[in-house]
Image (spheres, grey):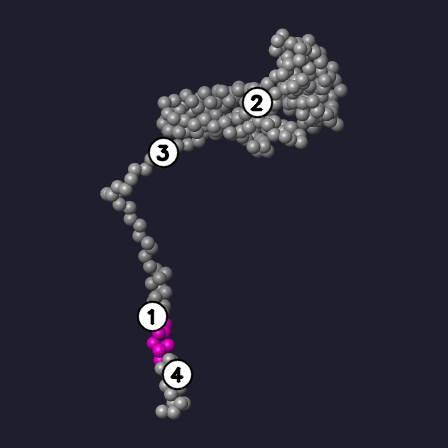
Amino acid sequence: MNIGQYILVIILYNLLWIITQIHPLDTTDKLQNDQVNANPFLIEASWTTHDYDLHTIPTLQVVANPLLARQFSPIYKQIFANLKQLNAEYTRYAAWFPYPKLAVAELDPPSGLYQCGNVGQDFSINLSCEQNGGVISKVDFASYGTSSGACGQMKQGTCHAENSSEIVQRVCIGQKTCSVPATNDLFGDPCKGITKRLLIQIQCDPPQNNTYYNFTYLDTMLEDFLDATDGHSRIISFCTQPTWLFKQDTPHIYPDNASLTDWGYPV
């Protein structure tokens, strides 16, 4: 056998081997069809065998919400009655934003030399110098309009009721406490169609430091939660901090209405 015949035999042998490895077209189609229509994996649970006990306890979280407030919710009793019927363990109560007045007891910082108030239209500023028999001795700043600024840094806005200081002095000077409503009825309307605020800064005689805790909504809501979960383990989580704990360029203005959301509240 010469070299040419030898090479030809090798080529024919390899060609025959390749052909034997190729499935017929109908065989290939059948394989693909079987793969597509194959039965899925079958998972079976056996309840006759025991590996170990699970100690997971189903529970839930109750978040501070206007619908839970006995002051203005028509269904708060029904909600807490349903919670009681669940008999759940480790229910968590979360006093959480975005309702600052339902979650934070002291939204305004403790006072220094000055006592201040800042409320929106149709709400009232309540001022006090009653510690140690004190009285309100001076009105440093008062403006019904678009004034702004933190206590000690209040600035008059472009909209301002000129009679603001006169009215606040008449109501507050010489009093242990005073309440001033931010209304057009009291101050007039210095800028029609614009939402206004009332800002007041006073001094006390003798000087005193005050705190501004308000548990009006927090206490009653927590009390109803504790009653509904009595006899069970529960978790209390006050998880929203006052914004004045942090340095800010301007003070955060929270809603005066406890039922309004404040998604911009810094947390």
Q: Which residue is mark 1?
A: 27
Label 3 crowd bin: few (<14), some (14–19), many (20+), radius 10 Å: few
Read off the magenta span.
Answer: 16-27
Residue 114 horizontal/vertical position (percent): 67, 18
Gap between marks 1 and 3 measured at Cα:
55 Å
Q: Secondary structure at mark 3?
A: loop
Q: Earlier in the sequence, mark 1 or mark 3?
A: 1
Which secondary structure type mostly characterizes the magenta part of the structure?
A: helix
Q: Does 167 sit left or right of 232 as displayed?
A: right
- Three-letter code, disc 3: Ile
Label 2 crowd bin: few (<14), some (14–19), many (20+), radius 10 Å: some
Gap between marks 3 and 4 measured at Cα:
73 Å
Q: Secondary structure at mark 4?
A: helix
Q: How many marks?
A: 4
State whether residue 75 appears in this view. Answer: no
Q: Nearer the viewer, residue 91 or 122?
A: 91
Gap between marks 1 and 4 measured at Cα:
27 Å
Contact, CB < 8 Å: mark 1 with mark 4? no
- Three-letter code, disc 4: Ile
Q: Which residue is mark 4?
A: 11
The disc placed on residue 106 is: 2
Residue 181 horizontal/vertical position (percent): 65, 18
Q: Quadrant of the N terminus?
A: bottom left
- Three-letter code, disc 1: Thr
- Three-letter code, disc 2: Glu
